[in-house]
Image (cartoon, rainbow, N blue to C red):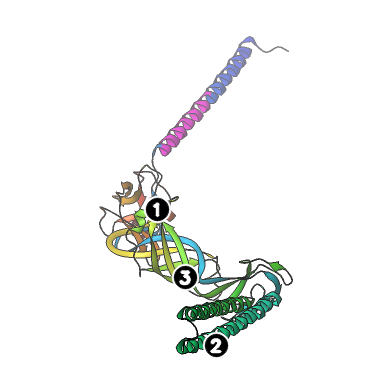
Amino acid sequence: MKLPRSRSAWIQWGLLALLVVAVAIGLMRALNKRATQQTQARQAAESLQKTPVYTLGASDLIAVRTLALTQTVPVSGSLKALQTAAIKAKVAGELQGLSKREGDPVQAGEVVGHIDSTEAQARVRQAEQQAAQAQAQVAIAKRAQDNNQALVTQGFISATALDTSVANLAAAEATHRAALAALDIARKGLQDTTLRSPLSGQVSVRGAQNGERVAVDARVLEVVDLSAFELEAAIAPGEAVPVAVGQKAELVVEGIAEPVKAVVSRINPNVQAGSRSVLVYLKVPAQAGMRQGLFARGQIAVGTVQVPAVPLAAVRNDKPQPYLQVVRDGQVVHVTLPPGATGLSDREPMREANGLAEGTQVLGALAGGMRDGTPVRLPSEQAANAAN
């Protein structure tokens, strides 16, 4: 059965209309999606161009304060004992009786060892015999001179013979004195075979062993007195100008928890040829656990200055000149610092903030770096906004 022609045409026109409507709806949806994407892109671009406002915390800000800064000169070096001694062999021979080792205590004048004294004792006995022989010759010459004196008085001999006897007596006496001097030298050589410590302290080095034959001036022991120390520090000539004897210093010694007080005791009048530095010597009192050779570093206090200052850590150096990040009118402003004084305040390194009024808000080291002109919100403003 076939539909009427008119009815078939209506169905075709209806399908065509539905197709047009569907196409129109799809087109409208695509246009709306594109418009939404464009709006979102525009909003994203605007948000990227807009600089965010950073809210600062109380720990991010530091106020410029007028402080008395202790100006210092840095020093460093190794500790040295004020008194050290090397016990050397004064005569050559076999080493005997050496019992001290590294770390053992010794007292001033204590016998620490011996050099074999067989030869020295023999030389003493030889010198004693020679001195006795010379003394006997003096006695013989004396009697001859006395006899000749009597004979000259009686006229039995001439005066020339008397003069000869006088000369013989003088020569015998001179020989006797030389023999006594040789005896003193021999006895001194015998004494030198005994090794004694010249000071009280501890043995730091043992350079020889028992039974070893040592030469003259061979180091046998080294002794260190740990009752007082000294720090030798090399500083630049410019920094050495304000340093003076009697100035106080504070040192940090490796292995010792608490800072150690020290005093400038001496200043070398010469500049070192190689380094062009000045040697400054600081007297350091002994502390428990302190040893020779420990590294120490610290500061010599050379004066004070009253200036507006900020912590040295707040000064930034990522530009050709150092600068501070100052908060002004709700934004960060980079302020270049001219040359100024540095020093310590309660052991914290500080820097003079030239040109900044007291109370000026500055970003501290914890805040990090911010670009010049970055908008910020202070903690007080944040609290006010929260209250409203």
Q: Secondary structure at mark 1?
A: strand
Provide the residue span drawn in magenta. Answer: 27-48
Is 40 covered by the magenta stretch? yes
Can residue 262 be seen in this snapshot? yes
Q: Amino acid at mark 2?
A: Arg
Dot 3: few (<14), some (14–19), or many (≥20) neighbours within 10 Å? few
Dot 2: few (<14), some (14–19), or many (≥20) neighbours within 10 Å? few
Which residue shows up at 64% across the image and 79% down it? 124
Q: Which residue is mark 1?
A: 55
User: Which quadrant of the figure contains the N terminus?
Assistant: top right
Q: Position of residue 154 (x, y in %)?
A: 47, 90
Separation (CA) of disc 1 from disc 2:
119 Å
Which residue shows up at 57% across the image and 86% down it? 139
Q: Position of residue 161 (x, y in %)?
A: 50, 79
User: Which quadrant of the figure contains the C terminus?
Assistant: bottom left
Is 72 covered by the magenta stretch? no
Displayed quadrant of residue 194: bottom right
Marks 1 and 2: which is nearer the front? 2
Q: Does label 3 or label 2 sit earlier along the sequence?
A: 2
Helix, strand or loop: magenta stretch: helix
* Labels 3 & 2 near each other (Cβ < 8 A): no
Decide which of 20, 248 is in the foreground and name it.
Answer: 248
Q: Secondary structure at mark 2?
A: helix
Dot 1: few (<14), some (14–19), or many (≥20) neighbours within 10 Å? some
Whether residue 112 sits left or right of residue 40 in the image: it is right
Whether residue 225 sits left or right of residue 347 in the image: it is right
The residue most toward the top is 5
Q: Which residue is mark 3?
A: 259
Q: Does label 1 or label 2 sit earlier along the sequence?
A: 1
Name the mark on residue 143.
2
Which residue shows up at 49% across the image and 89% down it? 150
